[in-house]
C-alpha cells in the first residue's frame, strides 16, 4: 500500500472515530479518540458549501513532455456559507521556483471551478502581492472517465479580475492531467 493511500486510510479512520465521539452540545468540537480534553474541528464545519482540491505533477504531458517536467500543482479551496473563502495553492515550476497563493476566491460551476487569490511567495519578486487565477475541471474519479483538467496559474492580474468578476472556466486554456486528481464538491 502506498504511503499516500496509508495516510488517506488513517485520516478516514480518524474521521470516523472522531465523528462517533462528537459532543452533541458543541457541533464544532469533536473528542479525539476518547481522549478527554483533546478536540478537533476537522471535517465538522457544516458551513462548508464548496470544496476544491487538486494534486498533480503538472500538465506537462498535455505538451508531450514527461510528467513532472515543470514541477507540481497543488490546491485546496474551501467556501463557507458565510462567504469566506480560504485555502492554499502552490504551482512549482522550472527555474523561477513557482508561486504560492493564499486563496480567497472560489466560483464553482458544477464540476468546474475558478480559484483565485494573492501571490504570497514567488521566484519573481514583483509578483508578490498581485492577484492570481486558475481554473480546474473534475471529470470523475474512475480510470474510465475523461482526464481531469487544470489551467496555468495566471498571475499579476488587476484586482477587478477576481471574484465575483473572474471569467468562467471555459475562458481558460485547460490541459488534461495524466496523473493526479481534481475534486470539485
Image: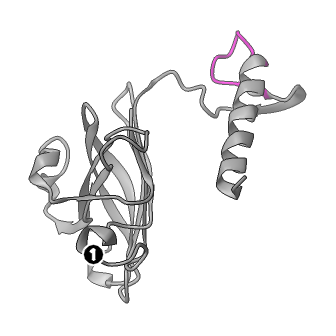
- Which image quadrant is residue 21 in? top right
- Does residue 160 lie above or below 101 as drawn? above
- Which image quadrant is residue 15 in? top right
Quarter of the rendering containing residue 119:
bottom left
Percent across and percent down for residue 112 are 25, 40
182 in relation to 89, above or below: above
The kind of secondary structure the magenta stretch mainly shows is: loop
Disc 1 element: loop
Q: Residue at x 45, y 56 (%)?
A: 180
Q: Which residue is mark 1?
A: 64
Q: Quadrant of the C terminus?
A: top left
Compared with 44, 14 (above or below) is below
In percent of the image, x 37 and y 38: which residue is there?
Answer: 140
Q: Nearer the viewer, residue 78 or 75?
A: 75
What residue is at 37 percent from the left and 26 percent from the top? 82
Residue 103 appears left or right of 175 = right
Q: Is residue 167 magenta?
A: no
- Residue that extends furthest to the bottom in the rendered view of this protein: 95
- In the image, 109 versus 34, the foreground residue is 109
Q: Which residues are magenta?
A: 21-31
Q: Residue furthest top?
A: 24
Residue 129 at least partly seen: no
| Residue 26 part of the magenta-drawn span | yes
Q: Is residue 108 visible?
A: yes
In x, y percent, where is residue 150?
Answer: 29, 56
* Percent of width and height locating residue 90: 42, 65
Amino acid at each position: 500500500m502506498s504511503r499516500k493511500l496509508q495516510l488517506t486510510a488513517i485520516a478516514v479512520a480518524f474521521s470516523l472515530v472522531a465523528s462517533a465521539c462528537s459532543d452533541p452540545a458543541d457541533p464544532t468540537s469533536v473528542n479525539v479518540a476518547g481522549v478527554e480534553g483533546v478536540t478537533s474541528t476537522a471535517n465538522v464545519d457544516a458551513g462548508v458549501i464548496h470544496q476544491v482540491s487538486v494534486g498533480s505533477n503538472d500538465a506537462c504531458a498535455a505538451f508531450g513532455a514527461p510528467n513532472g517536467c515543470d514541477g507540481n500543482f497543488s490546491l485546496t479551496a474551501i467556501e463557507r456559507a458565510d462567504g469566506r473563502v480560504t485555502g492554499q495553492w502552490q504551482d512549482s515550476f522550472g527555474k523561477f521556483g513557482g508561486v504560492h497563493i493564499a486563496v480567497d476566491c472560489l466560483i464553482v460551476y458544477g464540476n468546474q471551478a475558478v480559484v483565485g487569490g494573492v501571490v504570497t511567495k514567488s521566484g519573481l519578486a514583483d509578483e508578490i502581492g498581485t492577484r492570481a487565477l486558475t481554473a480546474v475541471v473534475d471529470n470523475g474519479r474512475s480510470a474510465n472517465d475523461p482526464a481531469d483538467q487544470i489551467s496555468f496559474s495566471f498571475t499579476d492580474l488587476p484586482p477587478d479580475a477576481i471574484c465575483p468578476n473572474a471569467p468562467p472556466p471555459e475562458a481558460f486554456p485547460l490541459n488534461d492531467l495524466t496523473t493526479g486528481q481534481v475534486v470539485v464538491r
